[in-house]
Amino acid sequence: MALYTLDSRQVAAGVKGREFSAEEYIYQLLERIEKVEPKVNAFVSVSKEALDEARVIDKKIRDGEQVGALAGVAVSIKDNICTKGIKTTCASKMLETFVPPYDATVVKRLRDVGAIVIGKVNLDEFAMGSTTEFSRYGATRNPWDVSRVPGGSSGGSAASVAALECTVSLGSDTGGSVRCPASFCSTVGLKPTYGLISRYGLVSYANSIEQIGPIGRTVSDVVLVLNAIAGADENDHTTVGGKPAHSLRQRKGLRVGFVREFIEGAEPRVAKVIHKAADTLAKQGCGCEETSLASVQYALASYYTIAMAEASSNLARYDNVRYGFDLDPEGYEWNSYFAKARSNFGEEVKRRVIVGSYVLSSGYYGKYYLKAQQVRSLIKRELKALFKKYDILIGPTMPILPFEIGEKIADPLRMYLVDINTVVANLAGMPAMSVPAGFTDGLPVGLQIMADEFQEQTMLDAAYLFEQAAKVQRSPDL
Amino acid sequence: MVTKEEVKHLSWLVRIDLSDDELERYTLQIEEIIKYLDKLDNIQLEHVKPIVAKKRLSDLRPDEPAGFEGNVLGTKYRKDGFVKGPRMV
């Protein structure tokens, strides 16, 4: 039996019921990784300890000890989330030797319920990008068509899940970085409400908008991982109290708002799939109607202003002195050493740090940053009003299909524009997810579902309802 | 209008050396990006308050240092138990 095709519940049940061992399952995954990695390039590093960890789980079960809800389940972790003893590079030369002395809260919580970290996966350097092309470790390729991008910046996460190299993954989402690759790789990806999941151990890019989020092949997998990692953490003061538990529910009669601005800019092939998805929800008894979110037009300018401003501030800490790549400080003057070392950031990171310092410059602050923050309020207010009328809002996650590798890399602004539908949720701090909606010309299309703050359960109800009715889930030939 | 001199100055402020090629390319690209961000200038926002954090300082945990065990520094450039950095003067 191909154990690597199983979902989280099946793996945990199989391991606990001793139908197969965690060791067998991990061994099969490692073989699978070896086979498909030359085509996909999702991993930055594969864990050397995964098999040993699996044996520990197996022994616990043999000895009758308690194991958690994700016993044995292999999870890949985006390489900007700290893993104790495993290199965490952010796909950057600046962190090529960085080995964290601690696990991020999310990683610790996954380990606590028996999950096994199978490896660290690729991203755009410091999570800045929408294609996973801006990586020191080369571009990750889309498992559905390896000449195309997997989306980004959590491209390694989504690609590794779609290519059956792990069962679930953790990504991070600053402006769509979980949902974009989830959409492009036909996987389920969720960005929670700001404050639902601890960011402790996530390498900061734009703290006020980013969240860690799970990616899986099914809604069920995403629910399991979400439950394991969500909840208050004293090491991240932006987390909110309590420990929520989400479930898979059969729920009918949801009120659905179809956002006109999200579909208007979409390419016709994508729009067709999304219209069909709305019909599917309507057939399931949801009340679907078109609605408008006018402030979308300012969302992207607001998002990039805030993200770049925060990036320029967050990345100021990389001086290459306490950790970094090999550059002898001998003979350098203080400032020239930093400027020399920091010239080793990649193309996109350098661009964003410089633009970030531009918008924060004295005289420009009120023109850009302050306005961007006001736009956030405006968007949130508009969304709050819509969520009085609707349980969820839908539209295409991405307005376009996965494109060819290299197609947009030389034109940053054109690249930024693809994030138009995803950034809204980050700015408002509200939850959003992408579920596979279908295929057109063999390429995946994702349906974005948004809900009000801390209404993840409603969003998951809609996603589950759609998943069960649409039956889109399948795996690529590799 | 974003000028080469501005980009050069900003790259110094953020301590990133740029090659001549980069300076040329970034100036054009940043000009285009800033032009896009200028959209923000055309919105009437006088009565909109920016989003602020809701947490109070009293909600935070005590600010006590919590160190890590073992060698946490990833550099081989050291002297007398200290990390070696570039010359200040």
Image (cartoon, coloured by chain):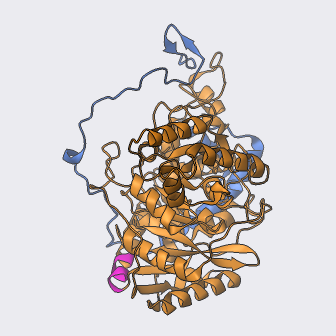
Q: Tell me what residue is drawn at x 48 percent, y 75 percent.
A: A464
Residue A81 against residue A193 in the figure, above or below: above
Q: Which chain is orange?
A: A
Count numbered badges in the picture. Answer: 0
Magenta: main secondary structure:
helix
Residue B63: percent from left, percent from top: 27, 34
Please state, as top left, top right, bottom left or bottom right, where the C terminus of chain A lies in the image: bottom right
Q: Nearer the viewer, residue A430 or B8?
A: A430
Left or right position of A16 against A180: left
Q: Farthest top residue? A: B80
Q: Quadrant of the N terminus of chain A?
A: bottom right
* Rendering colour (chain B): blue
**Range shown magenta:** A383-389
Is residue A457 in sight in this rendering? yes
State the image coordinates of residue A395 (x, y, percent, origin top left): 54, 80
Please name whichever residue, A64 or A2, is drawn nearer the observer in this view of the structure.
Answer: A64
The residue depicted at 42 percent of the width and 67 percent of the height is A431
Q: Position of residue A466 (x, y in %)?
A: 52, 80
Residue A102 figure quarter: top left
In this view, A25 is above or below A297:
above
Is A292 on the left-hand or right-hand side of A415? left
